[in-house]
Amino acid sequence: MAEFDTGLDRWIRAVQAIGLLSIVATVVAAWSAWQTLIGPHSLGTKIWSIIVALAMVQLAWFSLAFGLISIDLNY
């Protein structure tokens, strides 16, 4: 069957790598939002950085909730 072909392994690993990158990007966005909030920036900049950080938290949640981050290959 085509679903169990090992040729799909690289695509599954790519999705897993994107899931891991979303976790790293969430940490970076949260740190950036914190630095923006404590710095002398405008209110619009502060709100925008919070929105970006919340969007990254949602992406990280999606990656974790749907099992995109794992060590093994599950078909």
Image (cartoon, rainbow, N blue to C red):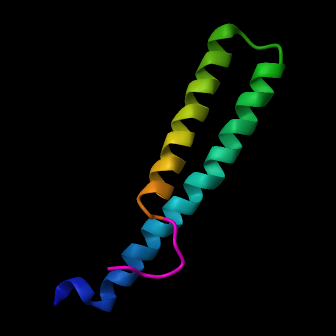
At 67% from the left and 9% from the top, the residue drawn is 43
Q: Position of residue 48 (x, y in %)?
A: 59, 21
75 displayed left or right of 40: left
At 62% from the left and 17% from the top, the residue drawn is 47
Count of marks placed on residues: 0
At 45% from the left and 70% from the top, the residue drawn is 14
Could you say which quadrant of the image residue 6 lies in? Answer: bottom left
Could you say which quadrant of the image residue 36 lies in? Answer: top right
50 displayed left or right of 11: right
Q: Position of residue 27 (x, y in %)?
A: 69, 46
Relative to 46, say whether 68 is above or below: below
Q: Quadrant of the N terminus?
A: bottom left
Residue situated furthest top in the rendering = 43
Which residues, given as a range, are shown in magenta?
69-75
48 displayed left or right of 67: right
Relative to 21, say whether 60 is above or below: above
Relative to 30, say whether 22 is above or below: below
Residue situated furthest front in the rendering = 65
Residue situated furthest right in the rendering = 39
Tell me if residue 70 is in the magenta stretch: yes
Residue situated furthest left in the rendering = 1
18 displayed left or right of 21: left
Q: Position of residue 75 (x, y in %)?
A: 32, 80
Tell me if residue 18 is in the magenta stretch: no
- Relative to the observer, which residue lies in front, 41 or 23? 23
At 53% from the left and 49% from the top, the residue drawn is 60
Relative to 41, say whether 31 is above or below: below
Q: Main secondary structure of the magenta part?
A: loop
Q: Position of residue 13 (x, y in %)?
A: 46, 75
